[in-house]
Amino acid sequence: MSAAAPDSITITRPDDWHLHLRDGAPLRTVVPHAAARFGRAIIMPNLRPPVTSTQQALDYRQRILAALPAAAQFEPLMTLYLTDQLPPDEIWRAQAAGVVAAKLYPAGATTHSDAGVTDLRKIGKTLEAMQKADMPLLVHGEVTDSDIDLFDREAAFITQQLIPLRRAYPALRIVLEHITTRDAADYVQQADRFTAATITAHHLLYNRNALFTGGICPHYYCLPVLKRETHRLALVQAASSGSPKFFLGSDSAPHPAHLKEQATGCAGCYTAHAAIELYAEAFDKAGALGRLEGFASFHGPDFYRLPRNTGRITLRRESWTPPHSFAFGDAWLKPLRAGEALPWKLA
Ligand SMILES: NC(=O)N[C@@H](CC(=O)O)C(=O)O
Ligand SMILES: [Zn+2]
Ligand SMILES: [Zn+2]
């Protein structure tokens, strides 16, 4: 085939800069999926109870490592969950112990965010410590105000919260996580070098029609929710632009199928079983496979100031079909594209 549409692509081993692994028995399903693809992953701290101390992060890290297959080489990069009460000292303790970032969940914005921050003014001292320690702040960027339309909550967060935050802590490295709108892509693109964003595979592949095609489809429901096509196109453009501000964060967020399929189904799409394959599909569709390596393997470590991985992975243009479910502790997990063919396969 021509160079424009190769049948295989070999790239530096990628990393996942936004990943939910959960805890307990489900780790045995989720951790091997991530470790087969990625060298490292930023592990989200929204457990119940949340990971709010250095010791909890270190203990959680051990449980993740214990769930790794024998030959796997995978480094979980741990994060702290910010609350109104997190003492600034904890930032220094965490950094000394190798915790790489802290996560801002506006209280009530998403899954397991009830212990999150109720008002940014309450965590000023902690943010100051982070800026001084040069520890990145990871942000779920949605306002929680019920007066704001659900589809506008990311754009409102940028104007109401992020721009003032950016101004108040100019040297704080901020990652706007899982961006879903043209507004966010434009904001990050024009922001300074201390600001970056992650983009999920599902937001590159789908618009909000996926939620309602043929009936309500809870396995496409995540937060921030899928947006209209113009936004998806802006995300594809940002991800494949070559800009170092955008990098891979799958936001693979497993929930037992019965909790997604009930009357109030919970938010989160599971993609860890095929994450890099789904990104390859999105980049291929955009005619931008040549830009996948920068997005998946270089821009993240460069922003986090970590070395790039040295190993490589190969993806082949070869159809395969993810199973209908995976065991998930005592329950079942339904992966994205369950039972539907994917065009790219990990060699
Ligand atoms: N993305 C989601 O829809 N859900 C995530 C939380 C989050 O990343 O906001 C989860 O933990 O389930
Ligand atoms: Zn989030
Ligand atoms: Zn997430």
Image (tube, rainbow, N blue to C red):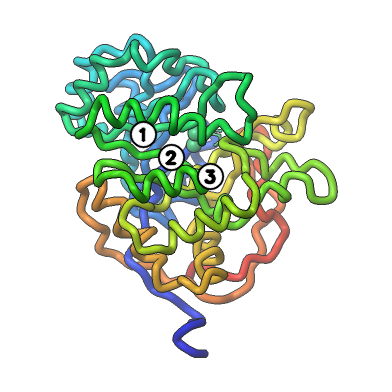
Quick check: marks 2 and 1 in contact, CB under 8 Å? yes
* Residue 180 - label: 3
User: Cβ(mark 2) to ligand 2 < 8 Å?
Assistant: yes
Secondary structure under badge 3?
loop
Secondary structure under badge 1?
strand
Please state the horizontal and vertical placement of residue 43, each as a whole percent of the image: 39, 37
Please state the horizontal and vertical placement of residue 269, each as a whole percent of the image: 60, 43
Q: In the rendered structure, which amino acid carries the disc numbered 2? A: Glu
Q: In the rendered structure, which amino acid carries the disc numbered 3? A: Thr
Please state the horizontal and vertical placement of residue 284, each as a whole percent of the image: 53, 71
What residue is rendered at 49% in x and 89% in y?
Answer: 2
Quarter holding residue 339: bottom right
What residue is rendered at 66% in x and 34% in y?
Answer: 256
Which one is nearer the viewer's eye here, 340 or 17? 17
* Residue 68 - label: none
Q: In the rendered structure, which amino acid carries the disc numbered 1? A: Leu
Among the two numbered marks 2 and 1 on one chain, the one whose residue lies closer to the N terminus? 1
Q: Which residue is mark 1?
A: 138
Secondary structure under badge 2?
loop
Q: Mark 3 or mark 1: which is in front? A: 3
Does 252 appear above or below 295?
above
Quick check: marks 3 and 2 in contact, CB under 8 Å? no
Among the two numbered marks 3 and 1 on one chain, the one whose residue lies closer to the N terminus? 1
Cα–Cα gap, marks 2 and 1? 6 Å
